[in-house]
Image: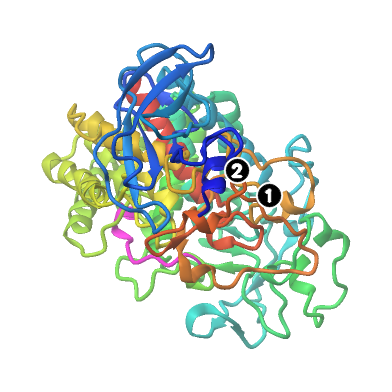
């Protein structure tokens, strides 16, 4: 990297800084730091130039409020930035807006950042998440004030059911034609789009609804807007379950097709166009774009894949708890009846655990955690309603927890592993073996903390695998659950570092939540955001960095509006790629900047759990 470019990136130009003055970059949490926390920023540059460097923190009046030496070198990120030094912000003891300036013969300054009380730092992005979910709404009940949304997929109100299709290895292509099941049409209208496409999955929607109801129960996020989205999500999940036939719809639409079945992922358009351009013949490959197929999780009364059954049951049980708190016992019992039956139908010995078609869209080996969550939420709902089954469900929850802990498919909190939420609720409900649950809450935190030791920016997640950002949010939530259960705040500083990484204290200097910070994704792989020209998709969380080889081929569609955003200062994202990871803010880069409801739901858990802990 040239000295002129690095100078520009560091907040000064080659014309204003002497040519022989070393420059460096400063990465901060652009969302803001919580007052009194162990807050850290980073300087990145040439290791030799940073050797004797220091820093000062200035307020908006230019007054110095803190200063000191840079921390010990944490190692090289890439060849351009072979020195990364932490900046301790612990001396800032007043709320305000600040900026870091490097000293000691090195030029560089940070973007402005806030330091404030936890509710003022985490409350706004938590509420912003609900704006994203409104943008994801499908059906007649959309919010035109968000992304200029218009009613869409109205034909979903009478959608045809099809047999489960066959996919080639890897889920790449549908084999053969879609075959009608003979079931009557179903009303699957409404719901949230899963991601940047227009598919609707029961499993991810149930996860999102669960996170919202958990957040609502914790009482730390705007209740009015949150309640509206909870109701919207539950209405759709309720339509997915047919108690008369005891069948659960698994998804609406198909994302992998062939010459005779054009899929959702073959077209780039606004969702309302699917109704306007509806094909008139089922022999037309475009038929399934507008006449979207519905696929079931099983036949009448047949076992349901345990992950999706567990999450739907948990969502219904949480709905029962909410209704019970509101004093509506009749509605609460109706939800509990549905939750109990879906739980009973969960396959306890699954040959496969498909939560989507093809299964590769959302692969999931873990399922005992989903049944633990369902059982504990059933127990809590049963206790609230005086149901005689409550103790049996509580015993089930403990058994599923033990089975999960003994398994070899344990993970980090996210759509594919809800054990942290389940453990937390089971501990609150009175677990028979609390020590094992507490140890398992600590497990992913210890694993992540060990990973963070070797990462120059302290990231506790792999940046060469999918879901780096949602996993980081999952760790933040888990740290709060652990502290709430034990009173041990040993992971509080680790959680603060993960939040900082998520919002800009990372090699790329970007926030991974749209609308938060001074630099955030401008070109998400999202059809409405790309085509509607209606501003930023605020509140959406993207995947973040991924393995470099994953970005060798980007998506491209004839109707896609070209969009590629560079980082500030005239750099390229590749300047900051390192250690096998890449990040790219370009509309075709689904691998790094496609938002999803499960990613964003995990962020809501992180915010609400941290805010609740502080209260």
Q: Is residue 368 magenta?
A: yes
The image's colouring method is rainbow
Q: Are marks 1 and 2 in contact (CB under 8 Å)?
A: no
Read off the residue under disc 1.
190
Q: Please tell me which residue lies in front, 501 or 446.
A: 501
Q: Is residue 320 visible?
A: no
> Does residue 377 sit above or below 111 in this rendering?
below
- Give the residue displayed 68% in from the left and 43% down from the top: 135
Q: Position of residue 543 (x, y in %)?
A: 50, 54
> Does residue 457 sit above or below 262 in this rendering?
above
Q: Please tell me which residue lies in front, 444 or 296.
A: 444
> Does residue 99 sit above or below 387 in this rendering?
above
Q: CA distance from mark 1 to mark 2?
A: 39 Å
Horizontal side of residue 188 vs 544, given as left or right:
right
Q: Please tell me which residue lies in front, 218 or 11.
A: 11
In which quadrant is the C terminus drawn? top left
Horizontal side of residue 511 vs 394, given as left or right:
right
Mark 1, residues whose alpha carbon is within 10 Å: few (<14), some, or many (≥20)?
many
Q: Position of residue 220 (x, y in %)?
A: 44, 24
Q: Position of residue 199 (x, y in %)?
A: 63, 61
Q: Is residue 244 magenta?
A: no
Mark 2, residues whose alpha carbon is within 10 Å: few (<14), some, or many (≥20)?
some
Q: Earlier in the sequence, mark 1 or mark 2?
A: 1
Residue 581 sits in which quadrant?
bottom left
Q: Nearer the viewer, mark 1 or mark 2?
A: 2
> Does residue 275 sit above or below 35 in this rendering?
below
- Give the residue displayed 69% in from the left and 56% down from the top: 187
Read off the residue under disc 2.
568
The residue stretch that appears in magenta: 361-371
- Give the residue displayed 47% in from the left and 29% down from the top: 216
- Give the residue displayed 25% in from the left and 52% down from the top: 454
Q: Is residue 475 visible?
A: yes
């Amino acid at each position: 990297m040239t000295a002129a470019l690095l100078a520009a990136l560091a907040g000064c130009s080659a014309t204003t800084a002497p040519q022989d003055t070393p420059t460096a970059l400063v990465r901060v949490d652009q969302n803001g730091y919580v007052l009194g926390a162990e807050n850290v920023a980073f300087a990145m540059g040439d290791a030799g130039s940073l050797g004797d460097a220091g820093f000062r923190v200035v307020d908006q009046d230019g007054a110095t409020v803190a200063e000191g030496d840079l921390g010990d070198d944490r190692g090289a990120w890439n060849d351009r930035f072979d020195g990364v030094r932490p900046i301790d912000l612990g001396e800032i003891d007043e709320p305000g807006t600040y900026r870091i300036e490097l000293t000691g013969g090195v030029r560089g300054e940070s973007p402005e950042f806030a330091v404030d009380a936890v509710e003022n730092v985490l409350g706004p992005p938590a509420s912003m998440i609900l704006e994203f979910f409104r943008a994801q709404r499908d059906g007649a009940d959309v919010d035109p004030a968000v992304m200029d949304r218009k009613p869409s997929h109205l034909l979903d109100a009478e959608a045809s059911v099809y047999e489960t299709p066959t996919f080639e290895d890897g889920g790449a292509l549908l084999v053969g034609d879609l075959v009608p099941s003979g079931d009557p049409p179903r009303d699957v209208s409404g719901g949230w789009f899963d991601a940047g496409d227009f598919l609707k999955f029961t499993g991810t929607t149930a996860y999102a609804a669960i996170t919202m109801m958990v957040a609502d129960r914790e009482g730390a996020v705007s209740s009015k807007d949150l309640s509206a989205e909870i109701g919207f999500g539950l209405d759709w999940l309720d339509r997915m379950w047919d108690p008369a036939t005891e069948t659960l719809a698994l998804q609406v639409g198909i994302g992998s097709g062939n010459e005779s079945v054009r899929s959702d992922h073959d077209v780039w358009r606004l969702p309302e166009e699917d109704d306007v351009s509806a094909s008139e013949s089922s022999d037309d490959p475009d038929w399934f774009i507008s006449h979207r197929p519905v696929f079931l999780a099983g036949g009448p009364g047949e076992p349901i894949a345990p992950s999706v059954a567990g999450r739907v049951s948990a969502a219904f049980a949480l709905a029962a708890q909410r209704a019970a708190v509101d004093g509506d016992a009749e509605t609460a019992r109706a939800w509990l009846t549905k939750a109990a039956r879906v739980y009973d139908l969960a396959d306890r010995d699954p040959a496969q655990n498909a939560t989507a078609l093809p299964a590769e869209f959302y692969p999931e080996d873990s399922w005992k955690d989903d049944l633990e969550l369902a059982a504990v939420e059933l127990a809590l709902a049963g206790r609230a309603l005086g149901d005689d089954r409550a103790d049996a469900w509580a015993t089930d929850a403990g058994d599923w927890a033990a089975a999960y802990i003994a398994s070899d498919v344990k993970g980090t909190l996210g759509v594919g592993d809800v054990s942290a939420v389940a453990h937390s609720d089971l501990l609150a409900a009175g677990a028979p073996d609390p020590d094992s649950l507490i140890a398992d809450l600590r497990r992913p935190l210890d694993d992540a903390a060990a990973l963070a030791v070797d990462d120059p920016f302290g990231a506790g997640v792999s940046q060469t695998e999918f879901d780096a950002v949602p996993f980081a949010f999952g760790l933040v939530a888990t740290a709060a659950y652990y502290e709430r259960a034990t009173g041990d705040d040993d992971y509080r500083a680790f959680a603060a570092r993960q939040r900082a990484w998520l919002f800009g204290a990372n090699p790329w200097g970007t926030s991974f939540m749209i609308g938060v910070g001074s630099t955030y994704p401008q070109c998400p792989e999202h059809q409405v955001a790309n085509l509607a020209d209606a501003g930023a998709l605020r509140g959406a969380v993207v995947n973040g960095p991924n393995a470099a080889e994953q970005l060798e081929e980007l998506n491209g569609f004839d109707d896609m509006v070209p969009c590629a955003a560079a980082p500030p200062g005239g750099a390229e994202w590749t300047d900051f790629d390192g250690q096998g990871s890449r990040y790219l803010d370009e509309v075709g880069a689904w691998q790094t900047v496609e938002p999803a409801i499960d990613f964003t739901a995990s962020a809501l858990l992180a915010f609400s759990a941290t805010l609740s802990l502080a209260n």
